[in-house]
Image (spheres, rainbow, N blue to C red):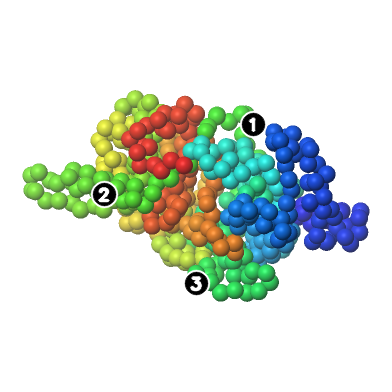
Amino acid sequence: MPFIRFKKDEAMEVGPQALNLRLPFGEMDVLEENLELIRRQLGLEHVEVLSAADEAARTRAGKYASLLNQNPPSPAPVVVDHLASAFARALGRFHPFAGRLVADEHGPAATTVSLRCTGEGAEFVHAAAPGVTAADVTGSLYIPRDLVASLFPLNGLVSADAAGPRPAPVLAAQVTELADAVFVAASLNHAVGDGTTFWHFMNTWSHFSRTSVSGKTTTTDRPPPPEPVPERWFPDTCPIPVPLPFARLDHVVKRCHHAPLPVDECFFHFSAESVKKLKARTNAEVTNSSIDTATKSTTVTTISSLQAVLAHLWRAVCRARKLSPSQPTTYVLFIGCRGRVKGVPPSGYVGNAVVPCKVTSTAGDVVERGLGWAALQLNRAVASYNADEAAMVRDSVEKWVREPRFAYTADMLSGGSAAVGTGGSPRFDVYGNDFGWGMRPVAVRSGPANKMDGKTTVYQGRGGGGAVGLEVCLAPDALTRLVDDKEFMDAVTVP
């Protein structure tokens, strides 16, 4: 781990005091010595430094002293060490993530990749951005891409880099001190886990941090996350590890050697009430259109809240992209397999257990035939998978063993069809991640990987109760038109 190497080098240079939890300088002294510089930089006539630890100073601060209680505690060394300790305990549960991916070459036309439980550890980074506030990250519909990217570890790597000549960890965390908040981030190699596994780990990390404060185990009214199940599922006929028909891993890994097409990102919040209205409107349209005029019979189909929200997005993106009515457009969904395929447990399975589901239509039909019609196409596609998903998954995996290939987000969002692809789930417990500060997260953002035109991520919305959050990436001109689309934005809660 880079942090361990850094501390080792520092200890060799300055001695045992490198491991002290106290800073080797006085924070008040530094501020007071630079008071004139601070005054000029802030453009103020007068600046006074008061210590929060001094009761007389707190009294002198008057009403402003209460501001100290409105923010999470500053992650001084003790707090950061507490987060690191909880991270290590969670890693103990998810012990394969302390290992490394290893590529073994077997002659001129065979390579295998394995996740070996070597215990080499995950990476934990402590960073500080004192000039950045929580509002800088979350205060606008538009996401500041470069700023948010800097708050995540392992940027710029592809999954195969973890099995390269200089193996990278498959899991890393970064805790960044902002001016008025703490940004807790993690990056998980997609070769070893999907979104369900990622949030299972985050829930476990926050659980250990929340239930052990100041060295004492505390009680909580929330049940602990389920135990991880690290045993991987493979069909009975599948060789383990799967032989890949190429001599070297880096011969087949796609890398972007040119500047990617520009995209902007927005985060749209749909309140629980807004989602209910969209769902009611969608189901009303579906019911009205499903009546057979000859027999007067009605086919009852219930559209889910998520399908209603995604259909609302699909129609708006078609308008924002100014697609011609005859232009093909595809929506790519990911369907979870846990509990639906024999051998894959419904809870705790560690790994990737999702399959892509594609719905293709024309932009004219999606836009002109209404919200209910668009949602019904998504509903029917998901239902077709639910009918015999186990067989479809087994066939897909067995075909992959015969014809191995790597999955790329760009491939699913290209191919001549103006596509939208959605990952994530509103069922993932995002806002329950209280790390022991007595407060829930104020927002969620994702790292820079796989950000391309049409990529969206769905999250649990703030406040719960069925609220939904959508992180949307589109070409800049299309995203501008999406934000200006009154029909779409009427359902969105603007920051």
Q: Residue at x 74, y 48 (%)?
A: 49
Residue 240: % across, % down? 59, 60
Instruction: Give residue 7's mark.
Output: none
Residue 431: % across, % down? 50, 57
Q: Residue at x 72, y 42 (%)?
A: 47
| Residue nearer the viewer, 7 or 97 | 7
**Which is more foreground, mark 1 or mark 3?**
3
| Residue nearer the viewer, 344 or 49 | 49
Q: Please name the amino acid that badge 1 sits on.
A: His
Q: Residue at x 58, y 46 (%)?
A: 134
Task: State whether residue 208 is above or below residue 461.
Answer: below
The N terminus appears in which quarter of the rendering? bottom right
Instruction: Give residue 221's mark.
Output: 3
Question: Which numbered disc flags the more N-terminal residue, 3 or 2?
Answer: 3
Cα separation between marks 1 and 3 = 50 Å
Report which residue position mark 2 lands on: 280
Q: Is residue 15 left or right of residue 37?
A: right
Q: Please name the amino acid that badge 2 sits on.
A: Ala
Instruction: Give the secondary structure at mark 1.
Output: loop
Question: Which numbered disc flags the more N-terminal residue, 1 or 2?
Answer: 1
Report which residue position mark 1 lands on: 257
Q: Is residue 274 left or right of residue 87?
A: left
Instruction: Give the secondary structure at mark 2.
Output: helix
The answer to whether residue 48 shows anywhere in this view is: yes
Residue 223: % across, % down? 50, 71
Cα separation between marks 1 and 2 = 47 Å
Q: Is residue 301 left or right of residue 457?
A: left
* Number of on-image labels: 3
Question: Which numbered disc flags the more N-terminal residue, 1 or 3?
Answer: 3
